[in-house]
Image: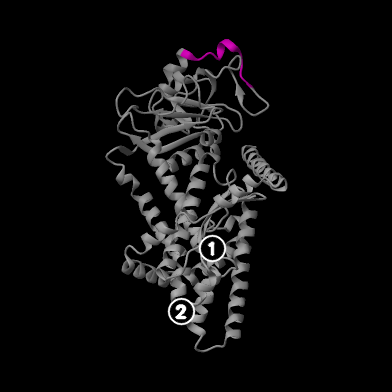
Amino acid sequence: MEIMSFLAVVGLIHAALYFTDQFLKSCMNMPYIYFLENVGLWIKPLQLHWFTTAFNRTVTKWALWRPRFFRLWFSVGAVVVMLLLLPSLFLLITGLANHMRPVQEQAVATLQPMVPGINIPMKELPYYFATLLMASVIHEAGHAFAAVQEDVHVNGFGFLLMFILPGAYVDVPTEEIRALTPFRQLKILCAGVWHNIVLVALALGLGLSTPYLMYPLYDSGRGLSVISITKDSPARGITGLEVGDIITSVNKQPVVSVAEWRQALVASSTQDQTGFCVPEAVVHNHDETVQHGEPYEGVDGSVQCCEGNSDAHLCFELLEDREADVGVAAMHPFSCLPARIAIARSDNVCVTSTTCPADTHCLAPSLKNVTRLVQISRGVRDGGVGAEQEDVLYLGPPAYLYHTVTLTSYVSKYPFLSPAWPSSLEVCCDYMVKFSGALAVLNMVPVLYLDGYWIFGAIIDFFLAPRCDHITRKIVHAVLTLVGSMLLFANIALGVWSIL
């Protein structure tokens, strides 16, 4: 619903802009028309375009700042991209083969459409737009810088928004590029992909080195910081989680990474309810089962032995093997106990009492099918100052907990530092690697209107011009373009199908 509402709002804004634009043009509103022409703005259905020459002088100045360096830079880029052309095609072929396998045998998709609200959380939309736009701008800047180096005129730069996808482009005369030698053409045509490859390497290096760069300000491996909780999260409450809490364990199992947090919740969801080694004295002193009659089994399979529907008291089932365990004869099979007291006095989790210390018994809450009792232990907050907090007892489906609570493995050493900052940097680097890498791969495939089409044309001329006539080279180029287009569109179609 959230993504549909967002897309509907974006669509309405585009529609309002387009119909307003058409209405003012039909009325011959000259001030408005002059404004569009002077600014370089035009509006199409679900598209916004802005073209400008304001950056031409700056780009020319920067490109001529170190001419020897840039000549070497783009020569190396052309060679690297040519070496990666066949691996990019192989990547599409393996991706296509992966989609053809049964679902249970498929590996993680290398190329997959990224759609906000489907496989991208809506809260990460700012990273999505910012990194996609930056990767596109860096790509086009590569073409512009290389064109200036090869004495090709740059007409200007454009920015566009196609529904929700931002992008950029550079206007360079095609005929001027075609007049150059094949290798000089390749230096311009490969510059965008080359810049995307370099951007992937930089983002990957920054993302992997973030824990070391942040070490003076943040701890890593001490627990998980809560950086956000949705308003409807069942983890909220007087005794629930709060932003800034440090989670140290789940059901007595230490967690120091988001992956371990997810693994612990998946285990809680897919396995039987965890049992707790509760001292026998707690059962004798706090058991209220006798006062409320005999337990009975509910329609959902859970056993009810407590009066009312209070979450403070839960019906605990005794997990005993009466033939192997000693001293259980006097224990009632079900006990109505105050959950917080019973679990606070428990030092271990268990499956049966044989794994519990002496004078304790393995008790597990009898709950509904998907409901679980999850014990979440919290450590010291506020930069290491203060006392440890009381454990959170979450009662509900573990999946809700995972989707409504956002954590990071960074714990700030100082109260004024937000633990979300290094996590945001890592997310930004992750998106940059994905988007810049995707732009590089897509533009290395021979597809009409993409860089790969022109790159393969220049390579064919470079290697086959002395051996083949113009018609033969055109046929080879057309065949490669057909194969590349079929590979790309098949991967995109199957990728979209896999996420629907």
Residue 379's spot in the image, x, y percent? 36, 28
Residue type at tag 2: Thr
Residue 394's spot in the image, x, y percent? 50, 27
Label located before the other in sequence (1 or 2): 2
Residue at the disc numbered 2: 181
SS type, badge 1: helix
Distance Cα–Cα, label 1 vs label 2? 25 Å
Q: Name the outermost residue toward the top.
A: 291
At x 51% / y 36%, what residue is drawn? Answer: 402
Residue at the disc numbered 1: 442
> Does residue 299 appear in this view?
yes
Q: Quadrant of the rendered structure where residue 386 is? A: top left
Residue 4's spot in the image, x, y percent? 65, 40
- Name the quadrant of the N terminus: top right
Residue 156 is covered by the magenta coloring: no
The boundaries of the magenta stretch are 286-296
Residue type at tag 1: Leu
Q: Name the outermost residue toward the left.
A: 216
SS type, badge 2: loop
- Between 420 and 450, which is closer to the camera in this rendering? 450
